[in-house]
Each structure stands twice: as structure tokens, then as C-alpha cells.
Image (cartoon, rainbow, N blue to C red):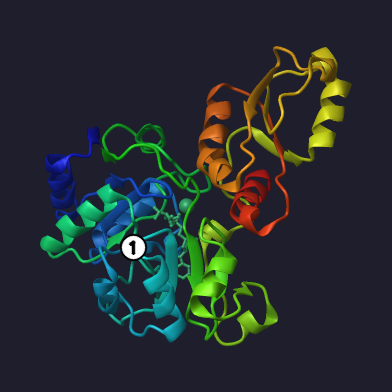
Amino acid sequence: MILRANEAAIAQAAQALFDGQLVGLPTETVYGLAANASDDGAVAKIFVAKGRPADHPLIVHVASAAQVPVFAAQVPDFAQALINAFWPGPLTLILPRQSGVAKASAGGQDSIGLRCPSHPVAQQLLQACADLGVLGVSAPSANRFGRVSPTSAAHVQSELGPDLLILDGGECDVGIESTIIDCTRGEPVLLRPGHITRAQIEAACGRTVLDKDAPQAALGQPAPRASGTLESHYAPRAKVRLMSAADIASKLQALGPHANNLGLWSAKRPATDEGFGSGVLWLEQATTAEQAAHDLFSVLRDLDARGVTQIWVQLPPDTPEWEGVRDRLQRAAA
Ligand code: TXA
Ligand code: MG
């Protein structure tokens, strides 16, 4: 059931979370599948609904930084600087977990992922939850495990069915999931690139951001399990292939009129003499990383829904601002 996110619907959703039920929740990045973070039974329903392995930890969403000490045992200075700079916003921090809280949500790990979303509906819902004593809301992306994250209420319903209460907060602005920084290893470690770039993180906290596979990052504890960081993820049904613009042009030409059930997401509409015909469904790829991130998951879904068997994607440039989009594309194609 999709409800337009007005005050009454938000109050109903907060009550549902308090009662141990699941709610589809809009955020500025993607839609989440929410449950009371402190209710292990409610959290277990998320894993069932998504088909996600129970040892993959979930992000806990909070109304403000004031809730951090409820869930995190300790906040290093550089993590506090990131909170000050980017919350509310699309940044998740992995911190040492306060023992005894949100154990199921953390997938049994002794760390916890915390994020304070900026979407006004998420903010209002988290505040309404806090007023009921629900201080954190666990929410992975509201898709079946391994599939494309939802960026609209209709996407959530098509993933998880008509029974789920979904707050409709419109299309997500950012379009790809939050940047995740692990703050448990002494230095900031990038677990998942996103809208907030490495350079912005470094500027805000004055530290070098390590890669998750860097030898320094491996010092201390082993890297935590993170499903958003699995090699194959975000997969539509159609097979995704990443190519340069030149490869797309020459391969289209080679196919000519035989191109069939082919989805194409590229910056330039192919010319007719490249074999562009009725068998090719072209969608325009934006030339800015922000707009392309916004469009990415809905383009994959849209082409899938139209029954293409292959999706050819022009691989964007290997420059810092495109890191998040390239990461999702590489995993959609894996
Ligand atoms: O933008 C987002 O972050 C969205 C919206 C709904 O907020 N949420 C999201 O959740 O992407 P999910 O579960 O699809 O991805 C969360 C990622 C996973 O890769 C998970 O393993 C990782 O965060 N994660 C959560 N807690 C963690 C922890 N304690 N240690 C390591 N990784 C953690
Ligand atoms: Mg996800």
C-alpha cells in the first residue's frame, strides 16, 4: 500500500515501526526497507523480505547526531568531523557498536553503521519514531537481495509486493546509496563510494581516505562483511555490458538490422548508419555524474521492464566524481 507522505501517513508509519512492522521509507539516496533497530524480531523480517543473508549488517538511521551514543560506543575525532560536515546527508559511518544494542541489525558484528538521512520525509519519520521511543531505524535498500535499488515508491512495491506500507516521498534525488566510511580502523576507509566523494571526505576530516583493500586498511580488524560491496550486485535481469562510445558505435554497425531487444544507455544517440533501428531502445546518459547517478537505477529498471535481453552502457570517465556511478555499473555488469 503506497501512502502519500503527509503528516497522518508519517504518524501511521511511525506507529507501524513501533509495533514491529516494516515500512518502505524514502531517503535522499534510495528507498529503504525500515524496521525498529532495537527490535530483533522486526529486524529479522527485513532479512526474510529481502532474501538477504542474516549475517549481512544493516544501516541504522537516526534523526540526528544526538542518537549516536545510543548505538556507538566511541566516535573518533575524524568521524565526528564527518558528522559535523555531512549530516544530515548521504554518508554512513561504521563505528564500534555499543554492546547489547541492535545486535540483529548489526548482523552480529561488533560495529554498527549509522546514517542520518536528509530527506524531509525520512527526517519527519525518524523524529516521530524517536518521540515513541524508537531511537534508530534499520533500513537496507528496499530491493530483493542482489537486485537494483529502488528510487521510487512504485519500484519498492514492484520489489516487495502490495502489502508493505510504503511512504511515497517522490523520486530520490541522489539515486545511488550513501557513501560508507569505516571509522573502526584508526583511519577512514572507503567501503562504498557515493555522492559524497573521497575528496570531500578528506577535505572535511583532514585525513587520507584508505581503500578497503589497501594494506594499511587491513591492519587491525578484518574488513567487515558488506553486501553493497559484493562484486556482483545491483543486477537487472538483462545482461549488462560496459563499453566505450567507440565500441558501442562499431558493435552496433556490425549488428546492423540484426540488433534485437537491445537496451542502450549512452551519451549520444547513435546514428542510423550505425544500425540504430527498432531493435534498439536508447536512453540518454547524462554527462554529469550527479544526473547520471540520479538516473542509473531507474534506467536499468525501465529497460528491464521493457524486456530487453542486453543493456549496453557507455562506461563513464575514470575521474573522481564518477567513482560511485562506475562502482554500481561495474557490479551490475559482474
Ligand atoms: O543510502 C543508503 O545507505 C541506503 C538508504 C536506504 O539509507 N541503505 C543501504 O543499505 O544502502 P544496504 O543495507 O543496502 O547497504 C548497507 C551497506 C551494506 O553493504 C552493509 O553490509 C554495510 O552497509 N554495513 C552496514 N553495517 C555495517 C557494519 N557494521 N560493518 C560493515 N558494513 C556495514
Ligand atoms: Mg542494498
Q: Is residue 15 left or right of residue 93?
A: left
Where's residue 144, x and y in %? 45, 44
Q: Position of residue 252 (x, y in %)?
A: 82, 24
Establish if 110 lies above or below 271. Answer: below
Vertical placement of residue 65 versus 327, above or below: below
In terms of secondary structure, where does tag 1 sit? loop
Name the residue nearer the viewer: 267 or 228: 267
Residue 277 higher or lower than 10, as above or below: above
Dot 1 alpha-carbon crowd within 10 angstroms: few under 14, some 14 to 19, many 20 or more: many
Asked if the beta carbon under badge 1 is closer than 8 A to the nearest atom of ligand 1, the reply is no
Depth check: 291 or 2 in front? Answer: 291
- The residue depicted at 12 percent of the width and 41 percent of the height is 8
Q: Is residue 108 left or right of residue 133?
A: right
In this view of the protein, can residue 241 be seen by the observer? yes
> Which image quarter is the N terminus in?
top left
Left or right of 171? Residue 323 is right
Judged from the image, the quadrant occupied by ligand 1 is bottom left
Reading the image, the residue beneath label 1 is: 116
Tag 1: residue type?
Answer: Cys
Q: For residue 66, what is the image quadrant?
A: bottom left
Asked if 179 appears above or below 151 in the picture, the reply is below
Residue at horizontal 44 percent and vertical 63 percent from the top: 91
Residue 104, by quadrant, is bottom left
Asked whether residue 110 appears in the rendered view, the answer is no
What count of labels does the image hold?
1
The residue sitting at 61% across, 79% down in the picture is: 208
Q: Where is residue 312? Give x, y as percent.
A: 71, 33
In the foreground, 61 or 52: 61
Which of the two residues, 213 or 126, is positioned nearer the viewer here?
126
